[in-house]
Amino acid sequence: MSEIEKIKKLRSLSGAGFNDCSSALEESKGDIDKAIEILRVKGISKASKKMSRSANEGVIAISENNKNSSILEINCETDFVAKNEDFINFAKEISHINNEVKSDIHALLSSKMKNDKTVNDNLLALITKIGEKITIGRSKTLNHSNSKIFKYHHTVIKDNLSKLAVLVSINTSDESEKIKTFGKQLSMHIAASNPLAIDVEGIDKDVLKKEEELISEELKSLGKPENIITKISLGKINKFKEENSLLNQQWVMEPKKKVKEILKELNIKNLKINEFSRIKIGE
């Protein structure tokens, strides 16, 4: 086998670039198996150096089976790489695995992919090949038990990959077109309105505390007296809670009504929003 043929074979086996394969073969004295090990070690080293950089681009993937629906964020540094075929294929395959392991990141990284290598090994190889930081970000799995799950993709890259995606679980056994339409519209509403929780009680207490501090500081900087600050702060924080709790938000399709009013108007027994997940790249 000629040197060029060996380089081509090593590139095919490792996914590494021409120069890296050539150097590895030279170091291994033409032994392809040893060259693969050399590339693996160097790849991990290169990947480690790249991991200090920021990765604010990428895709959001949604995968489903008859038991679960999962949403997964895969990040990279540039939008160019987010549309790269190798990156897209990697994202699509691991999104299906993520649904199988129910968003357990440790189980995901150690799971085998189609090439019989782990997700982690393939991730390192992809970082080395593409030359950018690539990370697996936020994820969530919703269970189908006694519920219907609806999804929405905004700015689709390809198939089940987009820049913003939503999963929402609704507690109902209703099979009508009415509930299907509502589920689709609700997922679109969540994408547009970005609620923090389903209801006021579900908003993180630390988020509320930080918002109260910001409101207080803003009013103090305007020279307001303490009693006025307390009164205005209460009104502002109550408004913040309403604007950021899904049930109290103005329905995107009909802004004069709130989401909870739309739910009531549907008049479907035991209808309830169980949970949702909204992930947007770079947010």
Image: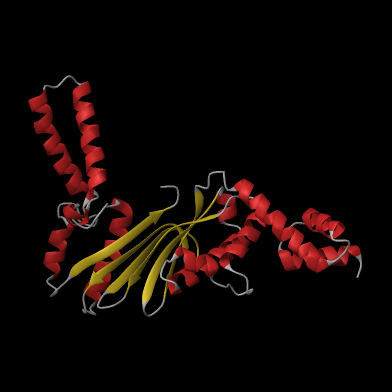
Q: Is residue 121 left or right of residue 145?
A: right
Residue placed most toward the observer, 11 or 207: 207
Q: What residue sits 39% from the left and 56% below the top?
A: 279
Picture mark count: 0
Q: Quadrant of residue 198?
A: bottom left
Residue 281 position within the rendered picture, expressed as x and y whole percent measured from the top left: 44, 51
Q: Quadrant of residue 24?
A: bottom right
Residue 45 position within the rendered picture, expressed as x and y whole percent measured from the top left: 67, 51
Residue 132 position within the rendered picture, expressed as x and y whole percent measured from the top left: 61, 50
Establish if 229 lies above or below 188. above
Q: Report whether residue 188 is seen.
A: yes
Residue placed most toward the observer, 262 or 99: 99
Identify the image quadrant of the N terminus: bottom right
Which residue is at the far top? 223
Q: What residue sits 14% from the left and 34% below the top?
A: 233
Establish if 35 lies above or below 78. below
Establish if 85 lies above or below 114. above
Residue placed most toward the observer, 86 or 68: 68
Q: What residue sits 63% from the left and 74% below the top?
A: 116
